[in-house]
């Protein structure tokens, strides 16, 4: 097959772009994937007990973007639900983000009613207030709420997750878990909150099942692609089509300026011969434990009649690039963004080379935002 486009990576970015190019543009597309499976970090599979698990941690598709929902719905039906998360604080499981339900669990009724009215008057019903902003409020009652959330929900969890104090972290990160002035326990507010009813992997299989798409697994792009004298070579011959790269940008250039910092995760799975471990899909451990959260998959996927239950604990650590480590979360600060800029500049001499995705662009994407970005890039290239 003579390829029009080569895509590096078979995750949501690469698979979406491949399907658009192959289907709408009748392009011949080669997808190169270093792992032995498609789906990227959304990959899921049945464990030894027949329970559907997310191998690289829990993933939930949530969006208000109709075009993204419509596109992905061509390849899957959905298990729709309102995703709720609780945090274990002392002996209580409280809803997070901290909301008005949480407020009434933490404080006795008269005080909770008074604090609720203050929050609504100050910020408006339904608003989402970043914790760092709430701490700046001049009202001592509001600051009391902020301090409770900061100490019991935010501070230690953030330090475990990022290995930094909240003040050192980008506002893009600290704003992700606000205080919510409503009685809605859902973690996300998007219209659609779902997982593919048969799993993410079957959805990816259907996306990549097209006569114009070829997928090569267990293939490192640096074994077949090279970049020399402003030209891209594929298997030793100049390639003049487009290359979409979704991998780690620093690895593409052999870490010339040093490694981009990430946080990684150690997932420790456990199967239990009991009906349920925690009764919730996700419980955050925000205070003293070494791990940040436990996911119980049957409550995430809606799987029924399972043989016991499977959980996973997540232990964050600093990514070093060692074998089997995975870069999950870019550590966004001025120095790291400057370092990324050096690598990005190196790609600009190749006119047919396009960066796409959280590793290539050194930023965080939800599934829907990544799908939309891939759709837009692919159609631009057409």
Image (spheres, helix red, strand yellow):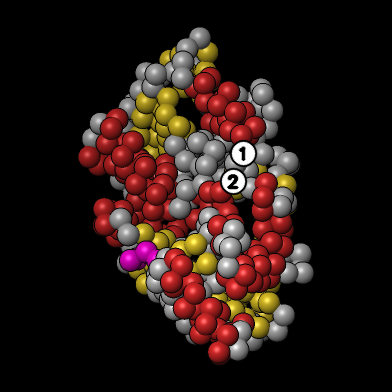
From this view, report whether residue 156 is shown above or below residue 182. Answer: above
Label 1: which secondary element: loop
Label 2: which secondary element: loop
Pinpoint residue 328: horizontal percent, then vertical percent: 60, 48
Name the residue carrying label 2: 170
How busy is the neighbourhood of tag 2: few (under 14 within 10 Å), some, or many (20 plus)?
few
User: Does residue 43 show up?
Assistant: no
- Occupied quadrant, residue 294: bottom right
* Mark 2 to mark 1 CA distance (whole Å): 6 Å
Pinpoint residue 29: horizontal percent, then vertical percent: 35, 34
Does residue 190 belong to the magenta stretch?
Answer: yes
Ranked by sequence position, the earlier of labels 2 and 1 is 2
Check the picture and name the quadrant holding the N terminus. Answer: top left
Pinpoint residue 159: horizontal percent, then vertical percent: 71, 56
Give me the residue at 49% from left, 62% from top: 129
- Occupied quadrant, residue 195: bottom left
Q: Which residues are magenta?
A: 188-192
* Prevalent SS, magenta region: loop
Name the residue carrying label 1: 333
Which residue is at the front of the view, 23 or 178?
A: 178
From this view, report whether residue 111 is shown above or below residue 241. Answer: below
**As drawn, is 12 to the left or to the right of 360?**
left
Q: Pointer 2 and pointer 1: residues touching (CB < 8 Å)? A: yes
């Amino acid at each position: 097959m003579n390829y029009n486009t080569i895509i590096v990576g078979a995750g949501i970015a690469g698979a979406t772009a491949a399907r658009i190019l192959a289907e709408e543009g009748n392009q011949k597309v080669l997808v190169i994937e270093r792992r032995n499976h498609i789906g990227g970090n959304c990959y899921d599979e049945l464990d030894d007990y027949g329970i559907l698990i997310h191998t690289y941690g829990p993933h939930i598709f949530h969006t208000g973007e109709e075009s993204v929902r419509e596109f992905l719905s061509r390849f899957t039906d959905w298990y729709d639900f309102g995703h709720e998360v609780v945090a274990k604080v002392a002996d209580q499981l409280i809803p997070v983000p901290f909301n008005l339900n949480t407020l009434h669990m933490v404080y006795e009724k008269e005080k909770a009613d008074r604090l609720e009215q203050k929050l609504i008057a100050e910020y408006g019903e339904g608003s989402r207030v970043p914790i760092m902003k709430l701490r700046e409020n001049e009202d001592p009652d509001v600051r009391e709420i902020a301090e409770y959330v900061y100490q019991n929900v935010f501070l230690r969890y953030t330090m475990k997750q990022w290995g930094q104090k909240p003040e050192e972290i980008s506002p893009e990160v600290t704003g992700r878990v606000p205080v919510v002035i409503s009685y809605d326990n859902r973690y996300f507010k998007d219209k659609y909150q779902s997982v593919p009813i048969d799993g993410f992997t079957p959805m990816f299989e259907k996306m990549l099942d097209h006569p114009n798409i070829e997928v090569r697994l267990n293939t490192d792009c640096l074994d077949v692609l090279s970049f020399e004298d402003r030209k891209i070579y594929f298997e030793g011959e100049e390639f003049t089509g487009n290359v979409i790269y979704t991998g780690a940008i620093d690895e593409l250039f052999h870490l010339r300026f040093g490694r981009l910092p990430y946080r990684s995760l150690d997932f420790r799975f456990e199967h239990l011969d009991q009906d349920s471990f925690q009764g919730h899909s996700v419980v955050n451990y925000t205070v003293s434990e070494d791990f940040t959260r436990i996911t119980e998959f049957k409550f995430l996927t809606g799987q029924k009649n399972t043989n016991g239950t499977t959980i996973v604990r997540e232990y964050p650590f600093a990514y070093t690039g060692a074998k089997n480590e995975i870069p999950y979360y870019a550590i966004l600060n001025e120095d790291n963004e400057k370092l990324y800029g050096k690598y990005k500049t190196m790609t600009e001499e190749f006119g047919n080379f396009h960066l796409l995705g959280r590793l290539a662009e050194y930023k965080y994407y939800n599934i829907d935002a990544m799908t939309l970005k891939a759709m837009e890039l692919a159609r631009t290239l057409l």
